[in-house]
Amino acid sequence: MARIGERGDLLRCTFCGKGQDQVRKLIAGPAGIHICDECVGQCTALLHEEEPDTPAVAGRPPAPREIHAFLDQYVIGQDHAKRTLAVAVHNHYKRLRLDSGRPAGQQEQVELGTSNILLIGPTGCGKTHLAQTLARMLDVPFAMADATALTEAGYVGEDVENILLTLLNAAGGDVRKARTGIVYIDEIDKITRRSENPSLTRDVSGEGVQQALLKILEGTVAGVPAQGGRKHPHQDLISIDTSDVLFIAGGAFTGLEQIIERRAGRGRAGFGATRRPPRQDLLAQVMPADLIAFGLIPEFVGRLPIVSTFQPMDRETLTRILTEPRNAPIKQYQRLFELDGVELEFTEDAIGAIAEQALLRRTGARAIRAILEEVLLNVMYEVPSRDDVARVVVDRATVLGNVNPALIPRDHPVRDQEPRDRSA
């Protein structure tokens, strides 16, 4: 900081001419040049104005094949959904790089629109997991919201714009980074209006939420309360432009297949009736008119132009989920036991039994972790306190018969004739 001259004269800013007594700080430079804190602030602001926007994804956006290959490491099956997402995400971030790389004031000859995505599939089929994995690959902020908790502005519940606050928090408060994030809205099928005819009364948790979501889906500058909660006068708001945010909505849409069947003329009974195709085959034929008949308003359907359907889980898929992905549940539990110096082993019959039990619970892959917790609860409680256990073996009887896993002691010489200690 500059000091008063030897003769007691006040030093002055070389740029604006203000004296040392008129500014908060005066910085001395070479050759007797000085600059005040106010001029430093103005220079900083000018530099920020001329600074180009940071592209959403460093370098070129990953190709659809690269995105698909990355998703294959974490998500089993759902090949069509992964292809659809890979293409949509690639095109979305390619558009962002085009916009950010264009000189200021220059207009693009062809305006590229956003491509928000609607995912339709039964619970536990991987919709949320796919969206989370995409955000992790692209290293962009990710926010997830439950549509059932949202209400129209002015009513008891959570404002739609609070979704953007969650995204901003995921970006560490960086507004520019938040603008290129991904928002996943789950249970979107639960905010359908109560009938196909517009209601004369308020439907604040259904059609009202769809109307409130329209603006942020199509791209708007939304004011988000810095502390969250409801907006009120004299409150500081953070402005977020949603034009470059990728919105992914997901839902089970139970009953949609009947609407598709009626439209396709397959709902006839009697001698002219045809065999009803599986639910997944019907959902693959979904049209915008079917979603409108289900209860989504036409404007909302138009903001979600890309629709992808998911296949329900079968025994083979659940078996692969247990063992193949990088974050497979069995691999996770084996790692937990490994930290205690214990090997965890599942027989093939045990893995098949877990898949069968998960199917019976009708919650898809979500049931797997609950079943594993039940099966391993006793040994996870006992093993960390014991030094004599080398290996834990889970077989079909352990899964189906509520029997404790076999504990193999250390330094046991014969692997094929192991004593089955189930005392845990």
Image (cartoon, helix red, strand yellow):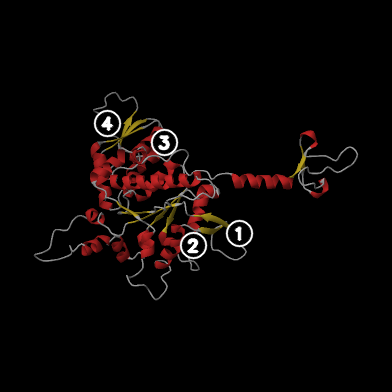
> Outermost residue, right direction?
7
| Residue assigned mark 3 | 384
Q: Quadrant of residue 256?
A: bottom left
The relative height of residue 57 versus residue 251 in the rendered view (above or below) is above
- Residue 398 visible: no
Q: CA distance from mark 4 to mark 2?
A: 60 Å
Q: CA distance from mark 3 to mark 4?
A: 20 Å
Chain-order first, disc 2 or disc 1 = 2
Amino acid type for the residue under numbered disc 2: Asp
Amino acid type for the residue under numbered disc 1: Asp
Q: Residue at x 36, y 68 (%)?
A: 193
| Residue assigned mark 2 | 159
Q: Nearer the viewer, residue 283 or 333?
A: 283
Q: Quadrant of residue 83?
A: top left
Give the secondary structure at mark 4.
loop
> Outermost residue, left direction?
271
| Residue assigned mark 4 | 419
Q: CA distance from mark 2 to mark 1?
A: 16 Å
Chain-order first, disc 3 or disc 2 = 2
| Residue assigned mark 1 | 236
Q: Residues within 10 Å of mark 1 (few under 14, many from 20)?
A: few
Residue 165 x/y as whole percent: 52, 55
| Label pair 3/1, CB-CB below 8 angstroms | no
